[in-house]
Amino acid sequence: MWNRIKVALGAILGIWFIYIGIQHFTDPVWFEPIVPDILGWPRFWVWVSGVAEIIVGLLLILPKTRRIGGLACAILLVILYWANLNMWINNIAIGGRTYEHHWHILRLLIQTALIGLSVFIWGGWASDNHQQD
């Protein structure tokens, strides 16, 4: 049963990450404002994160790479939260709109839940009985 749940979650997250990753190339301007200034070259970082999201999406979907995809997804979500935190702290508009604190708190909770799901797919919280897929 746990394996089926991981397969379903991997497929859903994988498709979502591929979709969002593609958006980084079809509409990079939308993502650029939240790239932290210290990094410089926002377009470059938008493209890098887009590639990373597509790769993670594929890893999550493919059975042989699903576990490593879960770990990669958790790590990527932690890294990418920096951009969301930058948007929150500096009240940066994205898509022509700024968001109130409750939206950012909701985003943080969703990001945390996604990290938890990714760790579950990876097997980081599995007991010895459920470690094998």
Image: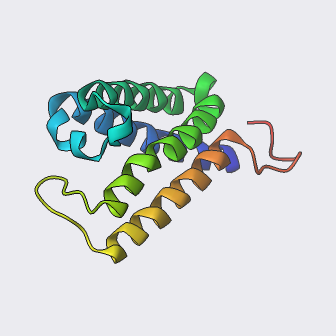
Q: Quadrant of residue 128?
A: top right
Q: Provide residue 121's location: percent of width, then percent of height.
A: 63, 43
Please name whichever residue, 116 or 82, is drawn nearer the observer in this view of the structure.
Answer: 82
Q: Residue at x 76, y 51 (%)?
A: 125
Q: Work out whether 110 lies above or below 16.
A: below
Q: Is residue 28 left or right of residue 12?
A: left
Judged from this view, the residue extending furthest toward the front is: 38
Q: Provide residue 118's location: percent of width, then percent of height.
A: 59, 46
Judged from this view, the residue extending furthest toward the right is: 128
Q: Provide residue 133's location: percent of width, then percent of height.
A: 73, 36
Please name whichever residue, 101 or 75, is drawn nearer the observer in this view of the structure.
Answer: 101
Q: Is residue 97 left or right of residue 128?
A: left
Q: Residue at x 62, y 22 (%)?
A: 64
Judged from this view, the residue extending furthest toward the bottom is: 102
Q: Provide residue 129's location: percent of width, then percent of height.
A: 87, 47
Q: Work out whether 18 lies above or below 2.
A: above
Please name whichever residue, 110 or 41, is drawn nearer the observer in this view of the structure.
Answer: 41
> How was this image coloured?
rainbow
Q: Is residue 131 left or right of residue 5?
A: right
Q: Work out whether 59 lies above or below 121.
A: above
The number of callouts visible is 0
Q: Residue at x 31, y 60 (%)?
A: 90
Q: Work out whether 113 lies above or below 48.
A: below
Q: Quadrant of residue 7?
A: top right
